[in-house]
Image (spheres, helix red, strand yellow):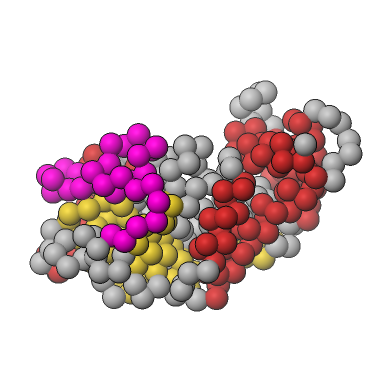
Amino acid sequence: MNGPGPSVGSGLHRLGPGVWITSGRAAVVEGLDRLAVVDPGDEPWEEVAGEIRRLERQTGKPLGWVLVTHSHPDHVANLEAARRIRPGVRVVAHPAGGLGPDLAVTEDRALDEVGPGVRALATPGHSDRGDDLSFWVPPGILFSGDLVQPKGETWARAFYPSPYPYFRDGDAYLDSLARLEALLLEVLVTGHREIRVGDRGRAWIRLTRRAVERLAEEAARWEGSPDPLAAGREVFQRLCRERGIPSDAVERRLAGAPGESPFERFDLPGFLWAWRRRL
């Protein structure tokens, strides 16, 4: 169980007027006189760079911007390579990510210098640094980074061996998801090249919110061991059963040396937020 995989095949795909997704997780947005890359990713760069250069030739516009949703390595490993395509390319990111952005974004703002109507949205909750940004591009394409993680198309059938997203600050996360759900949304593009159109995109946002809320509910009603690790493991297993995750996948998620299991690295932080919230 490794997620739904990319929603389009390999190669360059047009998502809307002046917007493309590359072979990697990088997307390209056409502005008035420059192109912008959203999240350069960590995939082998040669093919992605070739597709960006192809769009430069096709549009007659050079790469001028890199928009970063958050600073986790799988989203920014190719940042320096992207900068080398065109010296002087400018980076848009939250300053808490430690990337030294040329344009630092800490709150919602228009990015007219990137493209008409393009907006950066401060949407904290997923990243441990609180540096999550989402980008909205007219007429309704949303790049949500890793904020939208429903873990399944439906509640009862997850496609990933965890019933809820990786996150640190659930209160901020829920607020960010509510704001995204209120947007005019035609196409949702997650930080891992998953694409959902129309109501299916909004459903992914709602399902992500439900996963965080159910975690909080289970933690609030916990009456067993006062040890948060033991409680977290049990609540995790309960929610896995509720979402139809196979028991062997759950066992693998929980297995490993103390402090090193996938559960402790990626799932326990969210539970600890819910645990503190109940006190």
Give the image location of residue 247, x and y in percent: 76, 46
Q: Is residue 176 visible?
A: yes
Is 279 in front, or is 97?
A: 279
In this rendering, would 63 be left or right of 173?
left
97 falls in the magenta region: yes
Name which residue lies at 64% across and 62% down.
Answer: 207
Q: Quadrant of residue 58?
A: bottom left
Q: Is residue 114 above or below residue 264?
A: below
Q: Is residue 250 above or below residue 148?
A: above
Q: Quadrant of residue 236?
A: top right
In this rendering, would 122 be left or right of 238?
left
Q: Which residues are magenta?
A: 83-111
Name which residue lies at 53% across and 69% down.
Answer: 182
Please identify the residue farthest to the top as the structure is shown. 258
Q: Is residue 234 above or below residue 14?
A: above
Is 205 in front, or is 245?
A: 205
